[in-house]
Amino acid sequence: MKHQLILGILSMIKKEIQPDNVKVIVLNEKKDAIFRRVLGSSQNEDEGLDHTAIQKCIEKKQPVNIYGGCGLAGWRYPENSSKNILCLPFIIEGKPVGVLYLDRNDSSCPFTLQDLELLIVLSKPIQWVLKNGKEYREASGAVGLAGSLLKGRSEALNRIITLIDRVKDCETPVFICGESGTGKELVARAIHQRGARQNGKFVAVNCGALPEHLLESELFGYVRGAFTGALRNKPGLIEEANDGTFFLDEIGDLPLFLQAKLLRLLQEKEIRRIGANRVLTVNGRFISATNKDIEREVECGNFRKDLYYRLKIITIEIPPLRERKEDLFFLLDHFLERYCEDLKRERLYFSPGALELLMDYSWPGNVRELQNEIQRCLVLTGEDGLIKEEYLSPKINPGAVKSSKSKFGFYQARAEFEKRFLSQALARWNYSRAKTAEDVGLSRQGLFKLIKKYRIDANVGRKTGNQKKR
């Protein structure tokens, strides 16, 4: 690895952003550090490291900004709680292989959005060195999750994956329910691709997407002369799924007369093409899904009760995204990786403010809405590599919040107040440090530290007084 180049970049980061320490850490598949470089007041590679911040940065594949012990969405970190920390992951081929770690001991001087933008730009040469060095090859087998939408940390998703593994090889019909956009077809495809029928076809039909008069012929096929325009025999989609999997999405929209034919298919494994005199035996795995309250549809007479019981032998319920926010980071990372590659762009990151807005949103359109939002953001984002609040949709950012170069005005305002307050107190007591400390309720040592911290000239009054005496 080109160590001198990395040290040169660290020196530039130290000069431009002015952290107390800047560290490059490369991790292997066990998340052990296999390479480190440090520049700053502490040359001890492990001294003062906030491992919780690094862990969050690696897990979420997003920058972590901690100020006064508080981070994104109210996370609190027990280690180094008085420090300000800025941590940026190195993402190569979708996998986090290390971090760029900055810290400041001065709790009143947090890292800003401008610092993060600059850090992303300055980190690119290190990213290139890592990608082309042997350290990356040692680490690349490892950290992170595969780019699948069926990956995450929520208990609900783990239950779904467990059910998929249990039903993938059996012939029993599977019924998938969940709101629109939750990924019902994705679960159906996972059952097919992991199961014994993976070498057969996966045929999907959306009942709500086809007109009722075409749906029967599409599903069951027809013979020549069955109706005007039937010039040849045509097999239906159910036949095409023979020895494979047939997925009927939005089955709640299926007309009642077709529900009867579907029931016969499930019971007898037979179908009859429109206009045909003989039946055909089919051998396909049947999976159905709906976003409707199917029990309510049965009560209203819109769905056959016998078909309902035949379908719901095994049910997989997919909760909405708002109920499994733990999976949101993995989905964000998946779509960022996918669409950055499609658009031939370098890896982008969300600003802390944009990430909090995404986490707070209820996602009524679920995964599909999230997918569309990411595509929109990538089109609008500039070359600074950061997706900011103003690039989000009005429904996610209803207050039209814009990114600020300094997002943490509270801490800066407090620092300015303390400096002004102490300057006035010193002037009031003719810059007597002992009397000032007693007046404001500080120890003399505490006052000296604040004078030094804010670079207050505490000798102004004394100089003036000495000149008057002369």
Image: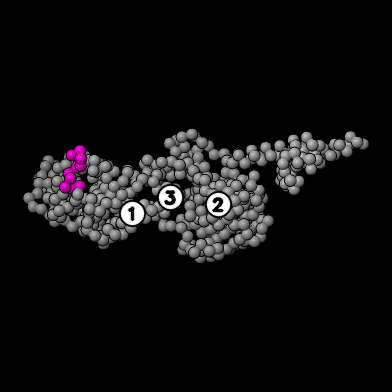
- Residue 129 makes an appearance in the image: no
Residue at screen point 57% across, 63% down? 35
Residue 375, position as x, y percentages in the image: 42, 44
Name which of mark 3 and mark 2 comes first in the sequence: 2
**Disc 3 to disc 2, C-alpha distance:** 18 Å
Residue 434, position as x, y percentages in the image: 79, 43
Residue at screen point 45% across, 35% down? 394
Q: Say which element carries label 1.
A: helix
Label pair 3/2, CB-CB below 8 angstroms:
no
**Disc 3 to disc 1, C-alpha distance:** 15 Å
Residue 2, position as x, y percentages in the image: 60, 62
**Extent of the magenta region:** 298-308
Per the image, the residue denoted by label 1 is: 160
Q: Is 327 drawn above or below residue 129 in the view shown?
A: above
Q: Amino acid at mark 1?
A: Ile
Residues 81 and 358: in front is 81
Disc marking residue 366:
none
Per the image, the residue denoted by label 2 is: 77
Residue 41, position as x, y percentages in the image: 68, 56
Per the image, the residue denoted by label 3 is: 326
- Residue 22 makes an appearance in the image: yes
Relative side of 184 to 256, left or right? right
Q: Amino acid at mark 3?
A: Glu
